[in-house]
């Protein structure tokens, strides 16, 4: 049981280049999230997904796109990288208790991807 | 914006209890209090959560005041490996997003 994994661990891009970050989870979780963390700051939500085939914008979505074609994978894309996107990117997943009240449980985080845009 | 207020940093002696306070005076009735920690740039790790009753698990205890406007995370016997940034987060369990709103947290330094 690997939990949440992220690929790659490190990446250096030049301004204008594109790339895709891959997040995979083997816990059969419905919810998946992409956060970014800048130095000395807390995490900020970029995009999230509440199930296969669905995505939604978070707090800081500009410059990013996402896709959730399979339940276990959540992809984060940068179409034209900018230096302001230099950050550490964390993926997370969680499950919900479905019943009279939807209960969203604790999130499990991946190890992060350190991205530098020159 | 984060709905919580935490001290920027705290020190604790190894082996002693670490008590980390959190103020969440605007918490609403359907919001839980969650605690996560982040050890040296690793991904955040879930610690504990609660609604109104005190909670305990193998990692920590969570004490929530009766009016729910503040809480304290207690690490009963802190070790050097507990040095981390601790985040207190309130989350609406009835919401459809589930995203966590992180503040800057409390940097706990456990010293020998």
Image (spheres, coloured by chain):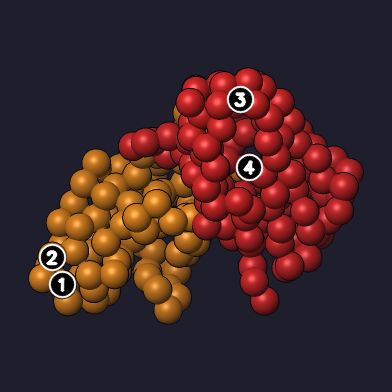
Chain colours: A red, B orange
Q: Earlier in the sequence, mark 4 or mark 3?
A: 4
Q: Indicate the secondary structure of the residue bearing disc 3.
A: loop
Q: Which residue is nearer to you in this view: A22 or A96?
A: A22
Q: Residues within 10 Å of mark 4 (few under 14, many from 20)?
A: many
Same subunit, tags 2 and 4: no
Task: State the image coordinates of residue A54 (x, y, percent, origin top left).
Answer: 85, 40
Q: Which mark is residue A81?
A: 3
Q: Is residue B105 visible?
A: yes
Identify the residue position indicated by label 1 in the image. B14
- Is label 4 or label 3 in front? 3
Where does the image place residue A61, in percent across and percent down from the top left? Answer: 65, 26
Looking at the rendered image, the disc whose residue lies closer to the viewer, 3 or 1, is: 3
Residue B111 - label: 2
- Check disc 1: other Cα within 10 Å, few if <14, some if 14-19, many if 20+: some
Residue A39 shown left or right of residue A69 in the figure:
left
Which chain is home to disc 1?
B
């Amino acid at each position: 049981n690997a939990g949440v994994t992220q690929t790659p661990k490190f990446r250096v891009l030049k301004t204008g280049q594109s790339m895709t970050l891959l997040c995979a989870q083997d816990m059969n979780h419905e919810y998946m999230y992409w956060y970014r963390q800048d130095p000395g700051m807390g995490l900020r939500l970029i995009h999230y997904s509440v199930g296969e085939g669905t995505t939604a914008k978070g707090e800081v979505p500009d410059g990013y796109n996402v896709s959730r074609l399979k339940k276990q994978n959540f992809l984060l894309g940068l179409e034209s990288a900018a230096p302001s996107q230099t950050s550490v990117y964390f993926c997370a997943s969680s499950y919900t208790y479905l019943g009279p009240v939807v209960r969203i449980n604790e999130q499990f985080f991946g190890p992060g991807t350190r991205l530098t845009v020159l | 914006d984060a709905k919580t207020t935490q001290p920027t940093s705290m020190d604790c002696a190894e082996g002693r209890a670490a008590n980390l306070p959190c103020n969440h005076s605007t918490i609403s009735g359907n919001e839980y209090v969650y605690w996560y920690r982040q050890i040296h740039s690793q991904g955040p790790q879930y610690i504990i959560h609660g609604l109104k009753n005190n909670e305990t698990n193998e990692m920590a205890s969570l004490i929530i005041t009766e009016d729910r406007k503040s809480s304290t995370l207690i690490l009963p016997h802190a070790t050097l490996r507990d040095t981390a940034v601790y985040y207190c987060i309130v989350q609406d369990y009835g919401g459809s997003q589930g995203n966590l709103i992180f503040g800057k947290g409390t940097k706990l330094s456990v010293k020998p």
